[in-house]
Image (cartoon, rainbow, N blue to C red):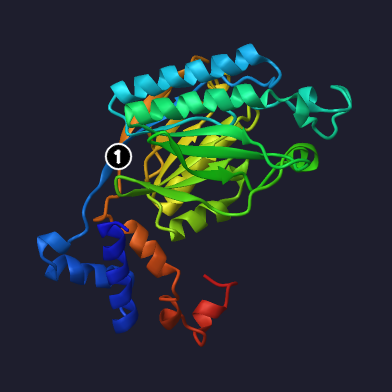
């Protein structure tokens, strides 16, 4: 548990005890606490990737190519001083629904996962996590996660550090095709911490569901990582990620395949909703880097939490005709 998390809990405890708003309690700590108890500003250099995503899990050569390109971008990110690198959905392979359909390309139906070269995928995953250990680089990448037969796999984000999987996020809000023919949905939000900053994971089409991002705000994340593989919805997702970052006052990372970057390149959004860094919008594999922080002195996020606690109720009026009559100037 980080010092910053402990500080937030002390502020909330005072607010509950005194009846103050979170902001008022925070001011008390800023006035009275010695420097060693004040909230500590923590930062992480984050890199976001747009890598080439292949869609045929039967093609051993393409699976190898994906792994080689991911590891090349990992080295670039480490050379740029990044502590964490974020890849798109299906960075290892994002199986095409028509290729996978047991009924043939013309009649999309249940996927035949026996066609996937699982052994080759595992070799590439192991090589990628081994490099993460060598570089000291947290690596978050999209991949298919095989379940026990006959269950369908998850579409997942794998979080690796020091050569081991720290955790895995499974996409929860699946598209109609994914839930009908391809994947098993996940069930829980996932967070992890890097150097005192907390990250949340989202995937696929989940940018369309603000409740996921509101829930991560309540979980005290400093940044949400969103990986997708949508060509059509990419520009919409990019705008939505700016909105989620602005409304929840945290950082957001947006990762898409390189081939989709012409309309919406990968990038990192600051808490105010502006792009802090973006990859080139030219279809090439690349990374973008930004230093993100927890900004404990910013009152915007605590105030929004306070605003949701009913503080306006005592100021409302019910017996003023000029307030009740909506047909007059």
Q: Is residue 236 above or below residue 75?
A: below
Residue 216 location, x and y as percent? 48, 54
Mark 1 lies on a secondary structure that is strand
Q: Is residue 229 visible?
A: yes
Residue 38 location, x and y as percent? 17, 61
Q: Residue at x 76, y 40 (%)?
A: 149
Residue 29 location, x and y as percent? 19, 69
Q: Is residue 97 above or below residue 195?
A: above
Q: Nearer the viewer, residue 41 or 192?
A: 192
Task: Classify residue 287 as left or right of residue 181.
Answer: left
Q: Nearer the viewer, residue 103 or 160?
A: 160
Task: Classify residue 196 as left or right of residue 30.
Answer: right
Among the 4 quarters of the image, the one containing residue 229? top right
Among the 4 quarters of the image, the one containing residue 227? top right
Q: Residue at x 44, y 37 (%)?
A: 164
Task: Classify residue 264 as left or right of residue 312.
Answer: right
Q: Residue at x 34, y 79 (%)?
A: 16
Image quarter where the N terminus lies is bottom left
Residue 89 location, x and y as percent? 57, 32
Q: Residue at x 57, y 77 (%)?
A: 325
Counting every numbered tag in the picture gives 1
- The local crowd at label 1, few if under 14, some if 14 to 19, many if 20 or more residues have their Cα within 10 Å, is some
Query: Which residue position holds label 1?
Result: 44
Q: Is residue 263 visible?
A: no
Q: Is residue 175 above or below residue 323?
A: above
Residue at the outermost bottom position: 319
Residue at the outermost left position: 34
Among the 4 quarters of the image, the one containing residue 234? top right
């Amino acid at each position: 548990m980080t010092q910053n998390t402990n500080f937030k809990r002390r502020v909330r405890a005072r607010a509950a005890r005194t009846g103050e708003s979170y902001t008022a309690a925070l001011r008390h700590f800023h006035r009275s606490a010695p420097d060693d108890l004040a909230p500590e500003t923590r930062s992480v250099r984050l890199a976001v990737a747009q890598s080439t995503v292949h869609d045929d899990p039967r093609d051993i050569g393409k699976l190898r190519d994906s792994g080689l390109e991911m590891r090349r971008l990992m080295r670039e990110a480490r050379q740029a001083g990044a502590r964490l690198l974020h890849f798109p959905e299906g960075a290892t392979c994002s199986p095409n629904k028509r290729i996978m359909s047991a009924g043939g390309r013309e009649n999309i139906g249940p996927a035949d996962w026996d066609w996937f070269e699982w052994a080759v995928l595992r070799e590439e995953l192991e090589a990628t996590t081994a490099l993460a250990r060598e570089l000291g680089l947290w690596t978050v990448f999209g991949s298919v996660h095989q379940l026990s037969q006959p269950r369908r796999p998850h579409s997942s984000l794998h979080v690796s550090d020091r050569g081991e999987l720290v955790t895995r996020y499974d996409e929860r809000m699946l598209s109609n095709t994914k839930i009908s023919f391809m994947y098993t949905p996940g069930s829980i939000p996932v967070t992890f911490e890097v150097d005192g900053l907390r990250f949340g994971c989202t995937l696929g089409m989940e940018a369309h569901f603000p409740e996921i991002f509101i829930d991560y705000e309540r979980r005290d994340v400093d940044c949400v990582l969103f990986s997708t593989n949508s060509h059509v919805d990419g520009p919409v997702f990019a705008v939505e990620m700016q909105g989620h970052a602005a409304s929840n006052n945290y950082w957001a990372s947006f990762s898409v395949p390189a081939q989709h970057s012409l309309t919406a390149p990968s990038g990192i959004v600051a808490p105010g909703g502006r792009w802090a860094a973006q990859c080139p919008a030219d279809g090439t594999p690349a990374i973008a880097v930004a230093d993100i922080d927890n900004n404990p002195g910013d009152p915007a996020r605590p105030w929004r939490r306070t605003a949701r606690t009913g503080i306006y109720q005592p100021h409302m009026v019910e017996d003023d005709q000029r307030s009740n009559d909506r047909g007059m100037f």
